[in-house]
Image (tube, grey):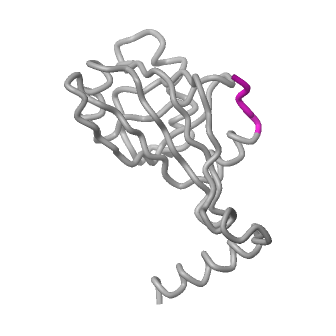
Amino acid sequence: MYIPIEEIKQYLDQSVLCWLATASIDQMPNVSPKEIFSFYQDQYILIANIASPQTVQNIEQNPNVCVSFIDIFVQKGYQLKGTARIISSSDTEFKTLEPSLLKLTKGQFPFSSITKIKIKSSKKVIAPRYLLYPNTTEEDQIKRAQQTYNKLIN
């Protein structure tokens, strides 16, 4: 399956949060927001495990995961499915992976493990408005999002 790496990287970099879905061994779902994440070697997503004991436990029982992220202004992004591994600080691979996430935390979010997700498939995610109103542009979506967020802030 073709995975558009450069476009995925673009939307990942423009996203503030990603959402990691896991399931326990008895198939109980869990979805958790993640703030510190990055692309790695064109086939992996790295996520700093800051406060996610349920996520870690689920991945240890069932490595199948789904990660979603969107640019909240353009309202486009990706859903990625794959398999995850928890890399603890005692693992030799941790020291190799840690710098790309430390760069994002700027020392503000300590983490002692990393979720390393091997991407197996990707699917574009777009706001329904693009489908229902085909003349919708990214600029239209940005204006709508800015108006919405300004109302929420003011």
Could you say where residue 67 lies in the image, as x and y percent from the top left?
49, 38
Could you say where residue 60 lies in the image, as x and y percent from the top left?
29, 19
Which residue is at the front of the view, 33 or 79?
A: 79
Image position of 25 with respect to 138: above or below: above
Q: Residue at x 55, y 41 (%)?
A: 79
Q: How many numbered marks does the figure carry?
A: 0
Which residue is at the front of the view, 114 or 63?
A: 63
Could you say where residue 107 lies in the image, as x and y percent from the top left?
45, 43
Q: Quadrant of residue 92?
A: top left
89 left or right, relative to 27 = right
Residue farthest to the bottom?
154
Q: Residue at x 64, y 68 (%)?
A: 129
Could you say where residue 122 lies in the image, as x and y percent from the top left?
62, 34
Image position of 55 with respect to 132: above or below: above
Image position of 131 with respect to 109: above or below: below
Inspect the magenta stretch and tell me whether residue 98 lies in it. Answer: no
Q: Residue at x 35, y 19 (%)?
A: 88
58 left or right, relative to 151 = left
The kind of secondary structure the magenta stretch mainly shows is: loop
Residue farthest to the left?
26
The span shown in magenta is 1-6
Q: Residue at x 50, y 46 (%)?
A: 106
